[in-house]
Image: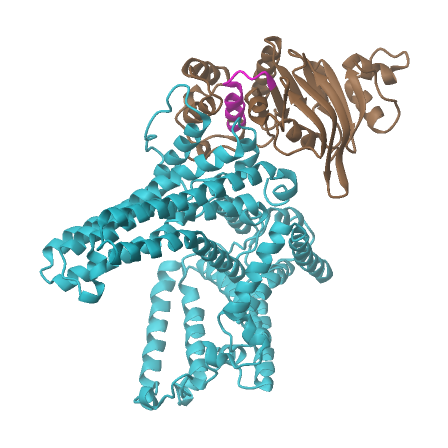
Chain colours: A brown, B cyan
Amino acid sequence: MHAIEVVNLTKSYGSFVAVRDFSFTVKPGEILGLVGPNGAGKTTTLRALGGIHPPTSGQVRIGGYDIMAEAVEARRRLAFFPDEPRLFDYLTVEEHLEFAAAIYGVAEWRAPMNALLDELELAEKRRALPAELSRGMKQKLMIACGFIHAPEVMIFDEPLTGLDPLGIRRMKESVTRRAQQGAAVILSSHLLHLVEEMCDRVAVIQKGERIAYGTIDDLKSLIAQGRGDVSLEEAFLAITSGVPQEGPRT
Amino acid sequence: MIHAFLFVTTRSFRNRIVSRLKRLRNVRYLLSFLVGMAYMWFAGWRHLFVGRSPLRHGGFPVSAFSVDLAAVVVLFMMILAWALPKESAGLAFSEAEIQFLFPAPITRRQLLLYKILRAQPQLFISAAVMTLLMFRGAKFIGVWACFIALSTYFTFVALGRARLKLLGAGFLVRLPVIAAVAAGVSYLLWRIVDLGPFRGLATRARPGRFPDFPALFHSPVADAILFVPRFFGHAVLPASIPQLLASCGILLAVALLFFELAARTNIAVEEASVQASERWAARRARLSQQGVGRQVTFRRIPPPFRIPAGARPEVAIYWKNVTAGLRISSPYLLIMAVFALYCLVQSFYIPELLVRAILAGVVLFVAAIFPLLGSFAFAQDMRLDLPRIELLKSYPISGERLVAAEIAGPLTFLAAVELMLLSVAAIILHAAEVPAELDFLASPELVVITLMLATPVCAAQLLIRNAVPILLPGWAMRAPDEQRGFNVHAAGSSMMAGNLLVLLFMLLPAACIMGPGLLMAKYWFHGSMPVVALTTVLAAALLFFEVWLGIRFLGRQFEKIDVTNELDAVAL
């Protein structure tokens, strides 16, 4: 069974169609990269996947549950990580994790919390309020809150914004490890080298429509024409400027 | 260059208005807008269109007295502005303005001109609202001219203070000088003020209309001191159109003069402006997400309880909001507790029983308005969480349960304080001598009724307050560069009027049960307490039922909120 199943997702705002007939699946343990130019519809897609706004039409299933019809069950299985960390100003780092654990019904949260604080280098700040944290630390805390219930599905919207190089490395390791443990991950980013490094498959979206979808090699092969040294960035630029056709579907 | 400045100013103003109007395509916003307009109409606008003199409806009288009074107020504002401690010469610019303008090839004079031009839309709206709501006898153009002259003057004073600082006359030097000037002017005006015509004025005044107050000053000295300030009075409250036009013209000339003087101070505003703008941006960010009942005051207060293992998400939301309430609104809790305790203790030391009754009356009055005002102080619910709506919507909890849990936190505080106030009032009344016509206030029946109804009334009020961010999130959140001023207060007062109206409707069904029930209890059951209690229980249950229906409705609406459509343009 697919962990994430998106069928003909369409999201409109009045006459403007932000996402049109977008379909894809993500298996457990797989990392899907969602890339596209600014305003392509990436955040809209991710928000629909996270149940944050209802799709105009189409279906989104998380762990087999429809995100609209069985919203609570679907959300219990996912963690949504927005690009901007919006924390509760009046809760400490530790209390954020306690709160997140309770929201997702995690009974034994102390050990995972301590492990996460160590993993994300927040242990020294466990009693600090968000106002006392840097932008990067807030981002890490946000991510820790999402990890606490060991979600089956993780949706990242620009997850590395504000992190230092070491933080970026740690974050990549954390996400990859969770994927290896069976989590399905969707990662939206403009950092194409990151996508190339972490993702198993990539969906390219432009003007709300999927214009390419496949493995990294599939996308590269679209423009390679015998060259062996094509980067994802070159492939992306070529694809979004209209050179290649729809990639192979898997 | 001025073309570019005017372009930014007018386009920003136009785009802001257009974006507001576009939002009205949504029926929820349109209906709320119409209700707000209806309120504004009844609050004062109708006087502008139905041709009746505003003087008969509470507007300021157009008289020599009013002009003199306005002139004195303006004079002291102008003098005291020099006594303010700030002397950094920082002008508040937005981040975008700093990025675009500071590296641009423009002079300080042009920067100052831009700042003054950019303030005009806000001054325009503030002048309009003030004319409509406060100075109904005034002419809009006059109020606007006053605002332009004053804002330019204050800009000049800010730069002037910085220049004085550079010349060695800092705050501590300025303060005694300005205090002496203010005292001297006060003394002089007091010596020459003519209060003779005011004696016996009350007996001469005809009921229903303002008496024709005479001028306060009839001396050449006063004419000299108040020469410029009187133009402000004449502009706001003109006796004739030529006087209005003449005053506005002179005020604009005064504004130009102050602009010229401000430009000639040649103070380096850039660095201080960057600092001021950063402070302003931080304050704005804080205000857009915080405000009364939203700022963390006691950071280290521990949570009141630990979340039980395996608790439902609702418990976590409640825990979060109660913790927030303690850390944010403890000062209000403390104030109310001290107030209640003071009244209680004081009542035992006051021998006069009537004074005790008055004290109890004060506590009852505070208890009566507390659900309304307390809901602002204890705002740790959807109002506080709106900026994090993306996160809330991703939680595995239905909208209905989320709304209920959000409201439960502040309800705990609100109901606790309300019950405390009512209990204190009841205790004081019990020990007081109450006049016969107010005897019912001390009756045990009333104590039972108020105590039983307190919590559902508080819940109803919180429900209404939470309806705003859920039904009208685009209005509940303030954009980072949102203008402030009288227009914001006007919007706030419309909201409050809407709040009271909805609360009235919510209380109506309960009142329909209470009224006949209490009459039956009094006349058929000789004021039987069980009957009174039963009636109150029914009314309270009905009120709770309404709250439950409201929560269900808001929960469904919460699930329908489209973050991208309604909030991204504002703040997310």
- The part of the chain drawn in magenta is A138-153
Q: Quadrant of residue A232?
A: top right
Q: Residue at x 21, y 66 (%)?
A: B437
Decide if residue B116 is in sight here: no
The reply, left or right, for residue A226 in relation to residue A153 is right
Q: Taken as a whole, is the magenta stretch helix, strand or loop?
A: helix
Question: Where B133 falls versus A160 (above or below)?
Answer: below
Q: Residue furthest top?
A: A181
Could you tell me which quadrant the N terminus of chain B lies in? bottom right
Residue A103 falls within the magenta-colored stretch = no
Question: Where B334 falls versus A168 (above or below)?
Answer: below
Q: Residue at x 59, y 76 (%)?
A: B49
Residue B41, image x and y in percent? 55, 68
Q: Quadrant of residue B443?
A: bottom left
Decide if residue A2 is in sight here: yes
Residue A104, image x and y in percent? 49, 22
